[in-house]
Amino acid sequence: RAMVKLLEASASDSTQEKLFEGMGRMASEQSVRGIMIQQGCLTTCLQLDKGEKPNEAEQKILRQARSCIAKLLVTTNPSILTVSQRSGSIGPLLKLVKDNDATDLMHFEALLSLTNLAGFSDETKNRVVAQKGIPTLSYAMFSEHEMVRQAATEALLNMIPHPTM
């Protein structure tokens, strides 16, 4: 909770980057993900992604925040999330998949999270389609990393019931 409070204050770019990096490292531990979501980490990460043109420092912060979202949602049951958390997570996750400077692990975790969300409901499938996610997922299927290709394929398979597919 303390990290969320620090981020809500006007923190410098370097402080924000380190706080999101720390939250990402904490989110690597599966047993604390639910507590982190309850304490507002997911909502804080989602609020950061405004969609404007970020400078290089802001891009690094956004990458850390999106990676934290991915880590939090890899194993989280989407039914415990609010509607705004579920639908709001899709855009940042797709942006992380498109980010050429992100690591293969970041791509992989984002794709697993998208698989989790896309398999949840028609509402989340519609959101993936509205965010132009199908071309992004298709592109990720041609990654050099085998696990990224598999995760992208799984995410697309969860989209099959959608009429666009």
Image (cartoon, rainbow, N blue to C red):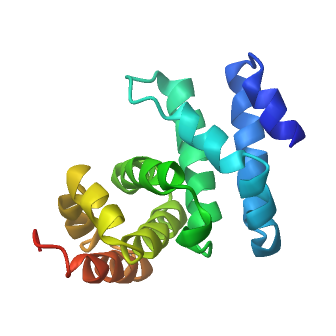
Residue at 70 percent across and 42 percent down: it is 20
- Give the camera-side residue of 55 and 6: 6
Number of callouts: 0
Quarter occupied by residue 137: bottom left
> Could you say where residue 36 lies in the image, as x and y percent from the top left?
77, 56
Quarter occupied by residue 80: bottom right
Residue at 44 percent across and 69 percent down: it is 117
- 138 vs 130: above or below: below
Quarter occupied by residue 149: bottom left
Quadrant where the image shows the N terminus: top right
Residue at the far right: name it: 2
- Give the camera-side residue of 4 and 13: 4
> Could you say where residue 43 lies in the image, as x and y percent from the top left?
63, 43
Residue 113 in view (yes/no): yes
Residue at 11 percent across and 74 percent down: it is 165
In this image, 148 relative to 165: left or right? right
Residue at 69 percent across and 34 percent down: it is 17
